[in-house]
Amino acid sequence: MGRLSRLAAGCAGVMVAVFGILHTFDAGSAPEDPRGTPAMALIPAGLALLLQVVPVSGVPAGRLRAGTAAFLALSATGAAATALGGAPATAVATALAGLALACLDLRVPRRSGGIAFRVADPLLLGAAIIALVALVPQLFEPAFPPGRGPDSVMPPHLAGALLCLATGTILARPETGPLHTLDDSGPRAAVRRLAPALIAAPIVAALVSAFAARTGVSRPVAAVSTGVILAALALLALLAYLVRTLDDADQRQRHLVAELRERQDFAQTLLQSMNEAVMVLDANYRVIDVNRRWRELTGHDGLPAESPPLPPPGTGGDWLLPRADGTDVPVLATMAAIPDATGTTRGYVATYIDIAERKQAEVALTEHAADLERGNADLAAALAFKNDLTSMLTHDVAQPISSIASLAELLCADWADLPDDIRLELATKIDKNTRRLIKMMNDLQLLFRLDTGTVTARRVPVPLLEVVEAACGTAVDTADVKIVIDEELAALADRGHLTVVVENLLKNAMTHGAPPIHIQAGREAGGTVRLTVQDSGAGIPEDVLPSLFGRFIRGAGLGLFIVRHLIEANGGSVSYEHAEPRGARLLVTLEAAPN
């Protein structure tokens, strides 16, 4: 179709150029100055039309062809302008056709973004209208009396040449001309369909008028009747076409509305069926729509009155989504912008995934890990206790057992040969080591009770002087102990616990320190009493102080560990400080008994 249309346009250009040459240089009718004849402008116009459809290859050749065609078209416009005084209608029509040829490929983009407007179209329309205005009266000449034909604005042969030039220019660009349209609807299609009927109407009218004149009917009456009938028929045809066009447009609109509604229903169904909570917002962050899952997650029946706090746009992250009852639900939130065709943000889509169960699992896992860590710590403590107990039994318990065994073996083997005093000495040593072993077993039993938390204190007012004197009588030589305690001073504690504490402190002072040992007590501010046991030894080494009150200290037994736990069970505390000028001082603080 494109090649045939261009071929027809090229033929029209050749015909117009030949007609311009013949009419301009006709010896019988040419004026003295051919430059004043409008037909002369048809020569460059026809050549310009021919160049517009000549196929070329390559960009330079195409530019040369377009430039030459534009130059010839403008030359035709200038030549037509010189004949405005003698034949204004012909000159104007020729000038419009020349300008249309010069602007054939010039387009002006529309602001709405539709098809670009071609400048040549209105120019061609003007030239064609002038040519038709000149031709139509000539078609009605048979309807008039002889010698009284209708007047015309230009000769018919020039009008026909101009109409041929306009038609060829339209055919030169069939893909962008006024006959081109993207679909079968719209005003451009209407013009394309009605153009043959509008062009054929005056021709049919002329034929009907000529037939009426040949049949003897009054020529004016035939002309008028024919015009009225044709006008009525044309009006009816136009109205029928417009009604049909409107009906087609209404059907297409209904179809588009139904399709749009179907797509909207599908999008709404898709939105409501999503398992994720979705909230749609406009560019001003106002909530437009939410889905069913969002209402279930937040407890809202409809759209929220105010936009809830929104996550930052970008990738998803943990977020707290507020509920209608004031609580928050942990979610994995994402916020994405919705751009239009130009990239401008039209709205936002916020998506929320409920992760409450995941958070609960994380909390449970964290608690389980903490339990495991505590269990591991308990196991480590139990392992350390076992190791320390084994070490203590190996060192501290094995020594008195070994001594008892060796002394008993010696006593049994040499009983008859040993004097009585040696027998008594050996028996006394066996008794001493046995008591020591019994004391260690009692300490271990108390240690196990302390570890299991079964030791409870029954606190009553206990006179400190009485407890200290009783402990000194059983644990050490009273000559090596100096006691400074008021007889009325009493502490609120378990009497048995306090006795064990004083005995262990005295034993520690005698074993690891040196006499004399000073024991004193007094009332302190805040309703407490302080008991001090100080020896005159070298003091406790610095490297032992961090674990002084620990469970096991090699060579020290369980005394200070038991002291700490018994004092703490009675609501008190125990500490150590260096004595001046030398020695170790252990301080026990207890609640004072009421007077």
Image: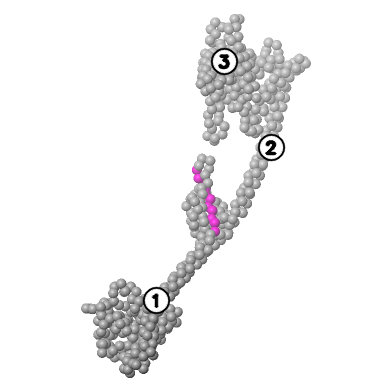
Q: Which residue is at a point 63% across and 49% down the rendered structure image?
A: 265
Select label 2 or label 3 by which is in front: 3
Residue 35 coordinates in the image, percent (x, y): 53, 10
> Do residues under tags 1 and 2 come within 8 Å of each other at their CB atoms?
no
Which amino acid is tagged 2?
Asp
Residue 47, numbered circle: 3
Residue 478 coordinates in the image, percent (x, y): 28, 90
Residue 257 coordinates in the image, percent (x, y): 64, 43
Q: Which residue is at a point 44% across and 74% down the rendered structure image?
A: 382
Q: Residue furthest right?
A: 215
- Between discs 2 and 3, the one toward the N terminus: 3
Residue 328 coordinates in the image, percent (x, y): 51, 62
Q: Is residue 112 above or below residue 70?
A: below
Mark 1 highlights which residue? 391
Please tell me whether mark 1 sits on a helix, a strand or a loop: helix
Per the model, the C-alpha gap separating discs 1 and 3 is 122 Å
Q: Quadrant of residue 301?
A: bottom right
- Classify mark 1: residues with Cα within 10 Å, few (<14), some (14-19) or many (20+): some
- Which region is colored magenta? 344-354
Please tell me whether mark 3 sits on a helix, a strand or a loop: helix
- Between discs 1 and 2, the one toward the N terminus: 2
Which amino acid is tagged 3?
Leu
> Do residues under tags 1 and 3 come within 8 Å of each other at their CB atoms?
no
Horizontally, residue 568 falls left or right of residue 479, namely right
Q: Quadrant of the N terminus?
A: top right
Q: Which residue is at a point 54% across and 59% down the rendered structure image?
A: 354
Horizontally, residue 552 falls left or right of residue 16, namely left
* Camera-side residue of 433 and 583: 433
> Is residue 584 at least partly visible in the picture?
yes
Q: Quadrant of the C terminus?
A: bottom left
Residue 247, numbered circle: 2
